[in-house]
Amino acid sequence: MAKWKIKYTGRPGRTKRPYIEVVLRFAGKQTPGHPMVVDTGSDRCMFNEQLARDYLDINPAMYGMLDKATGLSGTDDVAVFPHLEVFLPELKRSFIVSAQFKFLLFPGVIGHEGVLNQLKVTFHHGEYFEIDDSDHP
């Protein structure tokens, strides 16, 4: 297994964040890689529903299981897909997750269930974060 050191990134003049490139795969289709926030405060992975529509040919509101997601801004309706593949090109590793989709102003976040619960993530705030999968299958 391995250990990766990834620099925080962001637009000039904006706060740098712990982003990692993510490709979503479902039923033989996939999205292009998008930078997504590594969020240890998120229970699940959550993605912009437009990615599902544009690249995976699914409409989350019609075909996903309806659920609720609660966060700092309150509770929202989400569509859940129980077998979405999340591929992290930098790690050359895939995870099967129960993913939430909803309208977001950004591509998405990588949360605990299915991904971060299988990795050790250490943050060096504002500089870089480390991902270590040596203690995990």
Image (tube, rainbow, N blue to C red):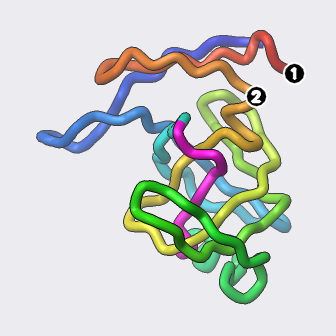
Residues at circles 2 and 1 in contact by the CB criterion of under 8 Å: yes
> Start and end of the magenta stretch?
41-50
Q: Residues within 10 Å of mark 2 (few under 14, many from 20)?
A: some
Q: Position of residue 99 (x, y in %)?
A: 71, 59
* Amino acid beneath label 1: Pro
Q: Residues within 10 Å of mark 1 (few under 14, many from 20)?
A: few
Q: CA distance from mark 2 to mark 1?
A: 8 Å
Q: Quadrant of the C terminus?
A: top right
Residue holding disc 2:
118
Q: Is residue 18 left or right of residue 27?
A: left
Q: Nearer the viewer, residue 20 or 30?
A: 20
Q: Position of residue 118 (x, y in %)?
A: 76, 28
Query: Residue 8 — which label?
Result: none
Q: Secondary structure at mark 2?
A: helix
* Amino acid beneath label 2: Gln
Residue holding disc 1:
137
